[in-house]
Image (cartoon, rainbow, N blue to C red):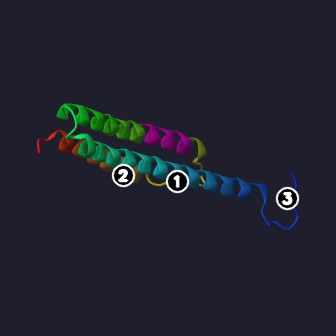
Amino acid sequence: MTEPSGTGQGPGERTTLAGDRTLLANERTLAAWWRTAMTALAAAVGFAKLFGGAGPPWLARAGASLLVLLSLLVLAVAFRNHRRTAARVENEYAASAPKATLWLGTLLLAAVALIVAAAIWLPG
């Protein structure tokens, strides 16, 4: 395969750059899923506050808890999908963000979700 005139890039360099772009897109997608999880947590708090005085208190808390569970589900699926994609793309030229960093971010968000769930069910 011949290189296109004027690009200055051979096939190997184009492949490396494509891998880098894919890994960066994968990390942006994970960040978007994290934002979705945080939005679900904010909605849970808002739901509990908005509907806490209407009807039985457990009903608003149960609805808010469903949003917290949605947040946890989003975090789990996002992390799993990110690791699958990163494993397929990683090679000797491109490397994803450190796995420990991604675990830490995901676990911190999951801990916040559990704290929100506890706060929703606490009396007051």
Identify which residue is drawn at 36% across, 52% down.
105
Q: Secondary structure at mark 1?
A: helix
> Quick one: which residue is furthest to the left in this view?
123
Left or right: residue 10 versus residue 68 is: right
Q: Count residues near mark 2 (Cα–Cα under 10 Å), then give few for <14, some for 14-19, many for 20+.
A: some
**Label 3 close to label 1 by CB (< 8 Å):** no
Circle 2 is placed at which residue position?
A: 105
Amino acid at pointer 2: Gly
Which mark sits nearer the N-terminus, 2 or 3? 3
Judging depth in this view, the residue of 70 and 8 nearest the camera is 70
Q: Main secondary structure of the magenta part?
A: helix
Say if 77 sits above or below 36 in the image.
above
Circle 1 is placed at which residue position?
A: 28
Could you give the CA–CA distance between mark 2 and mark 3, rounded to whole angstroms?
A: 41 Å
Which mark sits nearer the N-terminus, 3 or 1? 3
Judging depth in this view, the residue of 1 and 37 nearest the camera is 37
Q: Quadrant location of residue 5?
A: bottom right
Say if 2 sits above or below 115 in the image.
below
Q: Count residues near mark 3 (Cα–Cα under 10 Å), then give few for <14, some for 14-19, many for 20+.
A: few
Q: Secondary structure at mark 2?
A: helix
Magenta-tinted stretch: 77-87
Q: Secondary structure at mark 3?
A: loop
**Label 2 close to label 3 by CB (< 8 Å):** no
**On residue 3, which mark appears?**
3
Could you give the CA–CA distance between mark 1 and mark 2, rounded to whole angstroms?
A: 14 Å
Could you give the CA–CA distance between mark 3 and mark 1, rounded to whole angstroms?
A: 30 Å
Question: x and y percent of residue 102 in the render?
Answer: 41, 50
